[in-house]
Amino acid sequence: MRYAVLTDVHANALALEAVVDSLESRGIDSVVCLGDTVGYGADPGEAIAVIRQLCDKTVLGNHDSAAVSEGLEARFNQWARDAIAWTRTRLTEDEVEFLRGLPMTATHQGALLVHASPLDPGSWRYLIRGRDASAAFAAFEERLCLVGHSHEPVFFECGGTTTRVVPVGKLEMADDKRYIVNAGSVGQPRDGDPRASYAVVEPDAGTVEIVRVPYDTERAGRRITAAGLPAFLGERLSSGC
Ligand code: ZN
């Protein structure tokens, strides 16, 4: 049993397509999505259609939530607000209903799925450093919690009272430790690597691997500009920042 974890697609159909192609060579049995399927990018309808068809479980992200609830965009920066306003004009009733129906959390193969943090998921906290994660470990019981939101792949490990960040790559989970893994972002990575990011989990082997997939970021950027979205949202795809 091996499953893929996709998150923060952000309406980037080209990145999502590259990731879906890459899944085929990896013997994936199922796929889950940690939210933010829309927002920032030019293809919200395509992204929703693919995620709906592909994923066994999908949870709600803050951009998904803002796209279907007036007023929630007030907490976002100007680019994100502009993108949410644009996204609202594009979503069909059926797509709105799909996003509204997404749960805040789910479980899959013994792992907890949540967009931002298991600690008060609706407040969309960021887990960046070890100390952000230590409080989050107390908020769930599973061995593994999978998150997105920061757009940076990260492995946090908790053993006893110690929480530390483990180098990203392929994680072999120790039997006496618990983990929070950020799968990175499919559609808008911000760790300096512009390639699409997702994770592959093998529960029986106790491994989690971050996979990076190159795609045409220039073309994806042009789609964003052509759609009338802020130019910066297109430009940042090529730098991965
Ligand atoms: Zn996001």
Image (tube, rainbow, N blue to C red):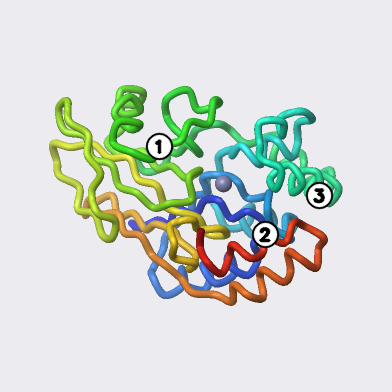
- Viewer-closest of 149 and 95: 149
Q: Is residue 224 above or below residue 101?
A: below
State the residue position of label 3.
Answer: 86
Q: Position of residue 169 (x, y in %)?
A: 28, 60
Distance CA(mark 1)–CA(mark 2): 25 Å
State the residue position of label 1.
Answer: 127
Determine the residue positioned at 38% across, 65% down: 211
Determine the residue positioned at 59% across, 62% down: 236
- Which element type, helix, strand or loop, lies under badge 2? helix
Distance CA(mark 3)–CA(mark 1): 28 Å
Answer few, some or many: residues within 10 Å of disc 3's Cα (few below 14, many 20 plus, some between 14 and 19). Answer: some
Q: Position of residue 119 (x, y in %)?
A: 42, 25
Q: Quadrant of residue 162?
A: top left
Answer few, some or many: residues within 10 Å of disc 2's Cα (few below 14, many 20 plus, some between 14 and 19). Answer: few
First-in-chain label (1 vs 2): 1
Q: Position of residue 234 (x, y in %)?
A: 67, 64
Determine the residue positioned at 75% across, 36% down: 68
Q: Position of residue 157 (x, y in %)?
A: 23, 40
- Which element type, helix, strand or loop, lies under badge 3? helix
Q: Is residue 121 above or below residue 185?
A: above
The mark tally for this picture is: 3
State the residue position of label 2.
Answer: 232
User: In the image, which disc is placed on residue 198?
Assistant: none
